[in-house]
Amino acid sequence: MEAMSVSVRCATVRFTASRLTYQDVCALARRILDRPRCELFVLDLEQTTDTSTAALARLVGLRRDLLAGGRDLRILGLHGRANDLYELSRLGRILPRLEPPAPAASAGCVA
């Protein structure tokens, strides 16, 4: 019997704290990079209202690392100061957001 490789198209990683720090992103990066079969990661930051430029820069680096391996990262959410920093930094092109999915569209993603 041959071993089968299973590829998961999408995985959602939820971050539930209100402040996203550089250390948080480093921990999330380790968690994400340890899942090599996922093609797309959605980082759910709906609860996040505050962050630092260092945390956003690390997210950009994480996406760069994923793209180099044929995978991708999208963010969902960001509110308050976190959203302000994202917008002021003009990160939309290099760290794209994912619009909240319609209920039927989220069926292909796993938590």
Image (tube, rainbow, N blue to C red):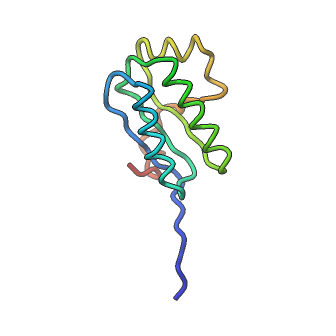
Front-most of 57 and 83? Answer: 57
| Whole-percent x, y for residue 66 in the image | 61, 44
Task: Count all numbered tags in the image, as a single digit.
Answer: 0
Near-viewer residue (102 or 62): 62
Instruction: Name the side, left or right, on which 47 lies relative to 34.
Output: left
Q: Say above or below: 47 vs 89.
A: below
Q: Estimate the x, y position of residue 16 in percent, counting from the top left.
A: 32, 32
What is the x, y in percent for residue 49? 38, 18
The image quadrant that residue 79 belongs to is top left
The answer to whether 22 is drawn above or below residue 43 in the figure is above
Residue at 38% in and 48% down: 111
> What residue is drawn where x is 38% and y is 28%?
46
Q: In the rendered view, does 54 fall on the left or right side of 72?
A: left
The spot of residue 28 in percent (x, y) is: 43, 39
Residue with the most extreme bottom position: 1
The vertical placement of 33 against 60, above or below, is below
- Which residue is nearer to you in this view: 102 or 30? 30
